[in-house]
Image (cartoon, helix red, strand yellow):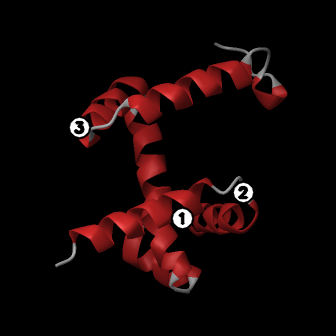
Amino acid sequence: MKRRVKGGGEGFEERLAQLSAILARLDEPEAVRAFLLDLCTPAELEAMTDRWHVVPLLQQGVPYREIYELTGVSVTTIGRVARTLERGAGGYARAVALRASTSERASP
């Protein structure tokens, strides 16, 4: 079993930068999907898609329990996403803005 080191261990930031750069260069959704399917376990993909699914509901002010009832995502996970929306690195906010701008362009 791989030994986990707090903070990602030696070289973590460089590996994260490399992964981020590759994701940014995959310009087609199907290419990103294929990469994620190869890279992640089914449980990891489910966790990520669950988190992303609750973001708009949290932004709309839907209560945690109602989000749980609508999605089946645990209240603990919903709480983590909410905290990250408030105090995270800003990734959710950028992705939500990108999704909104893409939706606006697609609307007639």
At x 54%, y 31%, the residue is 20
Q: Which residue is mark 1?
A: 74
Mark 2 to mark 3: distance in Å?
27 Å
Q: Is residue 98 visible?
A: yes
The amino acid type found where label 3 is placed reads Glu
The amino acid type found where label 1 is placed reads Ser
Frontmost of labels 3 and 1 is: 3
Q: Is residue 94 left or right of residue 6?
A: left
Are there few (<14), some (14-19), or many (20+) residues within 10 Å of tag 3?
few
Q: Which residue is mark 2?
A: 88
At x 54%, y 64%, the residue is 74
Asked whether 55 or 68 is in front, the reply is 55
Mark 3 to mark 1: distance in Å?
28 Å
56 w.r.t. 25: above or below: below
Q: Which residue is mark 3?
A: 30
Are there few (<14), some (14-19), or many (20+) residues within 10 Å of tag 2?
few
First in residue order: circle 2 vs circle 3: 3
Label pair 2/1, CB-CB below 8 angstroms: no
The amino acid type found where label 2 is placed reads Gly
